[in-house]
Image (spheres, rainbow, N blue to C red):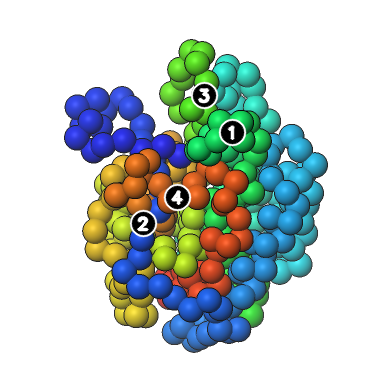
Amino acid sequence: MHIRNLKYLLLSCTLLLSGCGLSAKRSVSESGESSVSASGLSFSGDSAYAYAAAQVAFGPRVPGTDAHHDCVQYIGRTLERFGATVEIQTGEVMRYDGEWQHVANICAHLPADSAYQGEKTVLLCAHYDSRPWADQEEDYSHRMSPIPGANDGASGVGVLMEVARQWQNLSERKRPVEIVLFDCEDMGTPQFYTGKQREHTWCLGAQLWARMLVESRESKAVYAFGILLDMVGDPNASFPREYYSEQYAKRYVDKIWHTAEQLGYGHRFVSTRSYPITDDHYYVNTIAKIPCVDIIHYVPGSETGFAWWWHTHSDDMRNVNPGTLQEVGKVLMSVIGE
């Protein structure tokens, strides 16, 4: 991910932006409750944390590594155990250096009850890969090794795995849900690269998924809206109303942030607006034409626009808090459970 000044964006609209992180106005407890009811819907922050930790335990999930392969198998088997129909969508996308990159998106379908089969699907997504380079490390000698990707990747996936676990226990499933865990989100051009600069080098899995969906001519007919989770575990996380989300999916931004306010999480889902962020949701919106909202940790006052641990070896489980995951999960369950 990568971000630039909004004024610069408006003057040069061919450039894409992206980013993350923001210090919260209030922190949460160090541990989420074991199971909390929101509008009759349960969610466990502790379980979401455990799913995130299990991903990190494989090691950096860099495409092409054993850790990446093993993590795909773990996530797929777990979602199937929760009653989801799982498909691994594969393809090739050109990366920042002109080489072709293999992509493996994890797609899991959670059906609605038979009485609601005609309802449009809600898309829930996150990315599970981790960045191959720690190119924000101050020590240049440490920049060529991969990051743990605990918050930047595993936190959002952990929340969605817990959503899937809770989905099977609902007394009434009023709409189908599609969980898509994107690959190669974090393969964007590294800072140290000096070759030919290419556009659209981030979010390769989302680009593949969106294009394949358009080719199938199903995007508008099947999906109602989408929600993307990215870096949602920091104990001091704050989620502003992201620029592209407001541009393409304001109705759903309003819905999500209103739900959060009603649940008492207005300190977390803040009313301020962020600069444009080129995250997976950008391509869901612009290619697949599905209104999609990005819930993302954003730090407007930092040097990079990102959290201090972003794209460093410090992106480990110390930056993932069960209480934060629980709040995000309760908002999500309330929105999709209506």
Residue 308 tag number: 4
Label 3: few (<14), some (14–19) or many (≥20) C-alpha neighbours in 10 Å = few
Given contact means CB atoms under 8 Å apart, are the residues at marks 2 and 4 in contact? no
Nearer to me, 145 or 210? 145
At label 2, which amino acid type do we have? Leu
Name the disc covering residue 143, or none.
Answer: 1
Inter-mark Cα distance, 1 to 3: 9 Å
Q: Mark 2: give few (<14), some (14-19) or many (20+) Cα within 10 Å.
A: many
Q: Is residue 260 above or below residue 8?
A: below
SS state under label 1: loop
Alpha carbon separation for disc pair 4 and 3? 19 Å
Which residue is painted at 69% across and 56% down in the image? 55
Give the distance between the C-alpha atoms of the residues marked 1 and 2, in whole angstroms: 24 Å
Marks 2 and 3 close (CB-CB < 8 Å): no
**Mark 4 vs 3, N-terminal side:** 3
- Could you say which disc has been placed on residue 192 in the image? 3
Residues tagged 1 and 3 counted as in contact (Cβ below 8 A):
yes
Could you tell me how far apart the alpha carbons at marks 2 and 3 are, in whole angstroms? 26 Å
Circle 3 sits in a helix, a strand or a loop, which is it? loop
Query: Residue 99 placed where, x, y %?
Result: 63, 19
**Three-letter residue code for mark 4:** Trp
**Picture quadrant where residue 238 is located:** bottom left
